[in-house]
Image (tube, rainbow, N blue to C red):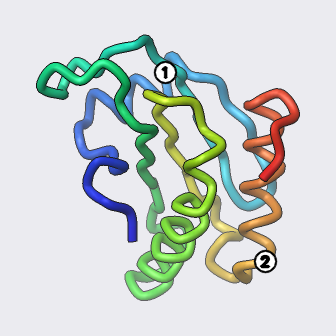
Amino acid sequence: MLSPEHRLRRREDFASAVRRGRRAGRPLLVVHLRTSGATDPHGPGETVPSARAGFVVSKAVGGAVIRNRVKRRLRHLVRDRLSVLPAGSLVVVRALPGAGEAGVDELARDLDAALVRLLGGVAR
């Protein structure tokens, strides 16, 4: 599970990452990354906010049980990769319809490939 300081919750943050960030598409998911400035507009005087992540899993992925399983897997995978993300960055991981049938290894492979592309070669 992601700790509260690492979660995206506000609609504006999701929109900012998707609209103003860079995107890397893979067969099972799309990753949006926005590296922000030195301050967090929602934090109380923080100068170096931590990287935050959010997830979008639509009904096209599957029923409620499948969607929740995909979200749990993605949260676990992103939690292990937060250390490679720049401070203050916003990450939105959008699951595509094939993610419901995919295993953890396949999701990890696609997530790593997308992050390598977005970060310019920084691997896990």
Q: What amino acid type should be assigned to the residue bearing mark 1?
A: Arg
Of residue 33 and residue 59, the one placed in the foreground of this image is: 33
Mark-to-mark CA distance, 2 and 1: 29 Å
Residue 55's label in the rendered image is none
Left/right of residue 94 with respect to residue 11 in the rendered view: right
Looking at the picture, does residue 88 appear above or below residue 69?
Answer: above
Question: In the picture, which quadrant includes the N terminus?
Answer: bottom left
Residue 68's image quarter? bottom left
Q: Position of residue 57 (x, y in %)?
A: 47, 61
> Which residue does the image show at 46% across and 17% down from the upper left?
36
Residue 114's image quarter? top right
Crowd rating for badge 2 (residues with CA inside 10 Å; few <14, some 14–19, many 20+):
few
Which residue is the extreme one toward the right?
121
Left/right of residue 65 with respect to residue 83 in the rendered view: left
Residue picked out by circle 1: 19
Of residue 33 and residue 4, the one placed in the foreground of this image is: 4
Residue 81's image quarter? bottom right
> Which residue does the image show at 50% across and 43% down from the upper left?
92
Residue picked out by circle 2: 105
